[in-house]
Amino acid sequence: MRLTVIGTGYLGAVHAACMAEIGHDVLGVDVDPEKVADLAEGRPPFYEPGFEDVLTRALDSGRLRFTTDLREAAAHGEVHFICVGTPQRAGSRAADLRYVDAVVDGLAPNLSAPCLLVGKSTVPVGTTARLAARVARLAPPGARVELAWNPEFLREGFAVDDTLRPDRIVTGVTGKAADETLRRVYAPMLAAGVPYLVTDPNTAELVKSAANAFLATKISFINAMAEVCDATGADVATLADAIGHDTRIGRQFLNAGLGFGGGCLPKDIRAFTARAQELGVGPAVAFLGQVDEINQRQRSRTVALAGRLLGGDLTGRRVTVLGATFKPNSDDVRDSPALAVAVELHRQGARVRVHDPEGAAKAVLAHPELRCGADLLTACQGAELVLHLTEWSEYRELDPVKLARVVRTPLLIDGRNALPHDAWRAAGWTVKALGRPAPP
Ligand code: NAD
């Protein structure tokens, strides 16, 4: 099938390459000419495991091209996937839909052949219906353009696998034709037995908001328990294991620590609360405000712990932050908890050095005031405190004996509760973590 993928960021670029991988003829479109040039040359504009391979294969097959020209896209696609960003609107909790609207405004007047517009971006419930009215106004008279929503659940770090072998596919359609078209797009996934749920657009949009709200709530729940543990000397890791054995609860997403960040969960729960308020059901999801607050508080709790461990004054103290990205196996630093802590430590006068295997360049771009690099031992040289804030496997595999020799004081905050604390303590480190009591 001839597909276009409009917006080739973390979501769209992977979607475009994977759609070519399963046999479609794909045109990727972006307003950023540099990104388009990089992708067309097979250079991933971001770090994502496995993406370069799938991109190269797709380009070599001749089934994937890139352009900045939306008119070319209008002529190419039987199906147009909308994958542009929906960030938080400045000065508001709501989603900024200007990029989605711009795609529709640019595409609709050029649509002469029958086609299906499919949103994949995360949007407030009601967006498909609003865009359908916009398309009807802007498309040429008689044009047969349908709209559908097909929310995306991929996780950065696993994006290629999640796209080719998703947990489930959800489509929100208003008619049989759109359903049949999307079933043809995803035929290989259907054949592989991927659960395929067809519903109306409102439900499809809400599924994504609800999924992210639930995941965020689970993380904030365990972090709230960590705060209670800190007040009582109880151990949140044991608590998580113990409640996680209950299959109704499950152990996943119950790791207490610095909390969630990135370009999705934080802005999505805020957009959900804003939309619920518009719909007059604000109280139904008011708890998400608390989920957000608990999450933000783990950042200030970590900074406060660092201050306490260094005797109350951070001025001039040498601190090393391990991790800049919001999660491992990505170079994405959008709303990164690790980076937020690094910035605050710097603001309070500490001499901060940040290490990240893949995210250092983007971290410096976002925060030129920070010193960031990809050499771990250099970053830790002379440190009075090391904070482990992003769960890269490289950090789990660190030799604490070797690291103890380069730091000034072997003092560690494990902000992800993920390092082998016993081994670090045996190597002479003092280890602190949120929600974990100090050993006797
Ligand atoms: P991103 O910022 O990496 O990518 C967005 C891309 O859209 C950019 O390359 C930008 O240049 C391009 N763009 C903006 N306006 C455009 C226009 N008018 N025409 C063509 N291109 C345009 O964002 P992302 O992380 O890929 O997220 C995109 C959407 O997918 C968001 O709604 C996000 O919530 C959702 N989503 C993201 C993920 C993820 O893990 N990143 C997962 C699920 C859903």
Image (cartoon, rainbow, N blue to C red):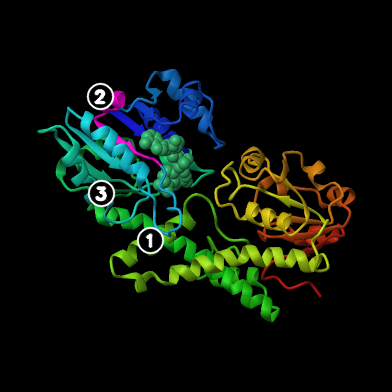
Q: Which mark is residue 128?
A: 3
Q: Quadrant of ligand 1?
A: top left
The numbered mark, 3 or 2, whose residue comes first in the sequence reads 2
Does residue 4 lie above or below 363 as drawn? above
Question: Which secondary structure lies at badge 3?
Answer: helix
On the image, numbered disc 1 is attached to which residue?
A: 272
Horizontal and vertical percent position of residue 151: 35, 48
> Which part of the image, by quadrant, shows the N terminus?
top left
**Residue 346 location, x and y as percent?**
73, 54
Give whichever of 379, 54 is nearer the camera: 379
Callout 3–callout 1 Cβ contact below 8 Å: no
Instruction: Estimate how packed mark 1 is, as few (under 14), some (14 to 19) or many (20 or more) residues with alpha carbons within 10 Å.
Output: many
Q: Earlier in the sequence, mark 3 or mark 1?
A: 3
**Which is nearer the eye, 18 or 415?**
415
Identify the magenta region.
71-84
Give the secondary structure at mark 1.
Answer: helix
CA separation in Å, label 3 and label 1: 16 Å
Amino acid type at image mark 2? Ala
In the rendered structure, which amino acid carries the disc numbered 1? Phe
Residue that appears at 43% across and 63% down: 214
**In x, y percent, where is residue 383?**
84, 52
Q: CA distance from mark 3 to mark 2?
A: 22 Å
